[in-house]
Amino acid sequence: MRDIFDAIQKSAIRIKDAIDVKDIGYSQQENSSGETQLQLDIQCDMIIEEEFSRVASVHTIASEEKADAELMHEDGEYFVAYDPLDGSSLVDVNLSVGSIFGIYKGDFGSAKMVASCYVVYGPRVEMVFAENKTKLYLLQSGEFEFVKEIRLNEKGKLNAPGGTQQNWAPYHKELVDSFFAEGYRLRYSGGMVPDLHQILLKGGGIFSYPGTSDKPEGKLRRLFEVFPFAFIYEKSGGGAIDGKNNLMTLGHAHVHDTAICFFGSNYEIARVKEVYAKNA
Ligand code: AHG
Ligand code: MN
Ligand code: MN
């Protein structure tokens, strides 16, 4: 695991440099979710692939930017799924973006996850790594330094509602509004890494990405967006559900499968469960 952690750190330093200097012009290609890939998305994918190609314990990789999983080392034990650049459409407006990694042992799947990690490229570069506990690191003079352990409070104050409101179910809108009616503040940038990072570091709240009329199964991808954050929120003392079930109990059929998802502290997750049990 140490060598994977090191490879992620090396990738993050290279990706930060790529973000800082690269012209992020659109490529002509679409990824498996039908989104136009930026040259920067592809470049970040190549950086991570190159770093993992040097790590013998990595058996197979799967990426948002690759149609299928790819074998790296026959004798490796870890399967790593990653989103090389989450929120890439925010780079041109200079908002924070991230990279997300799900580390699985023996095969991909929520039950096989053993660690997860994300990097935030903001005014500062930070990394959060969860194995048994959730730990925060800060990039300083080319090295990631341990800062602190992260624990969520039982209840927070932030509300980050994803997806187009026009396409929400009425009960979902009522749920989101009920948090605002209770005094929660809107915090949504459109990048799940900084949005979920903010909730984690400010002690709690709720991030939602519901099923919508145009995307009934949600938008966010199980292997490299949903499961990694579900793992981190659980290890931090919070919860992660699809409205009814714990996200870490969900299966997947394909690398790019999506799931409806809610991440938050315990109070907010309990409220979501209550509303979804009655309506969804
Ligand atoms: P990506 O840039 O990797 O495709 O992911 C963007 C995702 C995620 O970061 C964010 O939470 C979500 O898209 C935002 O979607 P909406 O604009 O539909 O809320
Ligand atoms: Mn993403
Ligand atoms: Mn991405």
Image (tube, helix red, strand yellow):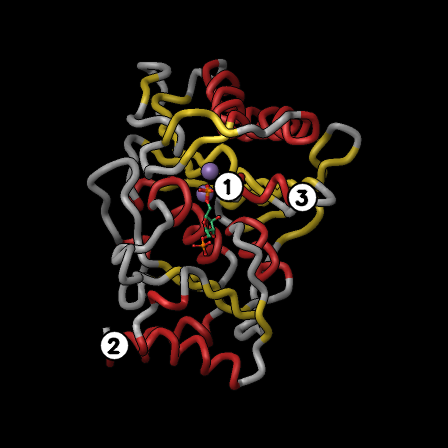
Q: Which residue is mark 3?
A: 94
Q: Residue furthest bottom?
A: 181
Crowd class of label 1 (few under 14; some 14 to 19; many from 20; radius 10 Å) = many
Q: Position of residue 242 (x, y in %)?
A: 31, 61
CB at disc 1 and ligand 2 closer than 8 Å:
yes
Quadrant hosting residue 59: top left
Which label sits on residue 190? Answer: none
Q: Which of label 2 and label 1 is nearer to you? A: 1
User: Can you give x and y, in whole percent of width and height, for residue 77 in the image?
Assistant: 35, 25
Examine the rendering and report whether any part of residue 3 can be seen: no
What secondary structure is found at the residue carrying circle 1? strand
Residue at the spot 29% in from the left edge and 30% down from the top edge: 106
Separation of residues labelled 2 and 1 (CA atoms): 31 Å
Mark 3 element type:
loop
At label 2, counting other C-alpha atoms closer than 10 Å, the crowd grade (few under 14, some 14-19, many 20 or more) is few
User: Which kind of residue does numbered mark 1 sit on?
Assistant: Asp
Mark positioned earlier in the residue sequence (2 or 1): 1
Q: Nearer the viewer, residue 170 or 210?
A: 170
Would you identify the image quadrant in which residue 33 lies? top left
Q: Position of residue 202 (x, y in %)?
A: 64, 64
Mark number displayed over residue 86: 1
Give the residue at mark 2.
277
Label 2 sits on what residue type? Ala
Q: SS class of the residue under badge 2?
A: helix
Q: Is residue 104 above or below residue 27?
A: below
